[in-house]
Image (cartoon, coloured by chain):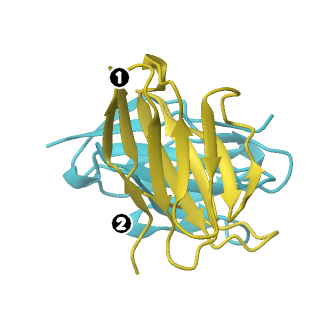
Chain colours: A yellow, B cyan
Amino acid sequence: NAGVMQNPRHLVRRRGQEARLRCSPMKGHSHVYWYRQLPEEGLKFMVYLQKENIIDESGMPKERFSAEFPKEGPSILRIQQVVRGDSAAYFCASTPGVSGIPYEQYFGPGTRLTVT
Amino acid sequence: AQSVTQPDIHITVSEGASLELRCNYSYGATPYLFWYVQSPGQGLQLLLKYFSGDTLVQGIKGFEAEFKRSQSSFNLRKPSVHWSDAAEYFCAGMDSSYKLIFGSGTRLLVRP
């Protein structure tokens, strides 16, 4: 059973470009979380999605960031017009996501975004 | 607001010595608590979790943690540290919408 997959593992973008980060959850998991880890810091929640629905986006910056989890295919975290401060590791986690039940979250290896 | 605090930024122990990493939480109801480990350049691996029941939780790699409501703590312990345990350790709590709130992490260094 494959774990959570993220690609690319490393991404370099120039300021002003767009970054697209992909996350494929574990088989059978329908809920995805995105977290950001700035250098020398812990992980901070960004967004919580289930297929075709955003459940909680309270951690997303108001501008330039968006996320989706379509019916088919991976979840995408999109950052438009990247700035140096977006340089970080972005982690995706997945759970089976049955409503009302807490589950441990299984993390992917992360995408390390560098903005030059 | 819910929060998780790891008071120690760095901890250094000798190989074979015992280890305790501190974690304090601030939650109103019964918390769901986790410990994760992150090796350099890697993702997070779950070591153990506490949802309810027995307050002493056993995890992988010989780790255990004890939930103490009176002290609002969930400290991670290991009786004998191996060099391969050198990594960053994160304590996390799950809030009412099931997202994780992480502490700032404790970096463990192991002396030979």
State which quadrant residue A28 falls in: bottom right
Q: Chain of mark 2?
A: B
Other-residue count near label 1 (Cα within 10 Å), few / some / many at <14 / 14–19 / ≥20? some
In this view of the protein, can residue A105 be seen by the observer?
no
Q: Are marks 2 and 1 in contact (CB under 8 Å)?
A: no
Q: CA distance from mark 2 to mark 1?
A: 41 Å
Which residue shows up at 38% across the image and 30% down it? Answer: B10
- Of the 4 image quadrants, the one containing the C terminus of chain B is top left
Residue extending farthest right: B28
Q: Is residue B35 above or below residue A40?
A: below
Place residue A35 in its image quadrant: top right
Element type where label 2 sits in the image: helix
Residue located beneath label 2 in the image: B61
Residue at image position (51%, 53%) is: A92
Q: Give the x, y percent position of residue A70.
A: 63, 62
- Residue at the farthest left position: B112
Q: Secondary structure at mark 1?
A: loop
Q: Locate the N terminus of chain B by quadrant.
A: top right
Look at 68% across and 52% down and name the residue there. A48
Residue B76: percent from left, percent from top: 50, 52
**What residue lies at 40% left-to-right and 56% top-to-bottom?**
A6
Amino acid type shown at disc 2: Lys
- Disc 1 designates what residue? A14
Which chain does the residue under circle 1 lie in?
A
Marks 2 and 1 belong to one chain? no
* Label 2 Cα neighbours within 10 Å, binned few <14 / some 14-19 / many ≥20: few
Residue A66 left/right relative to A93: right
Closer to the camera, A84 or A41? A84
User: Which x, y percent locates residue A32?
Assistant: 61, 59
* Amino acid on which the number 1 mark rests in the picture: Arg
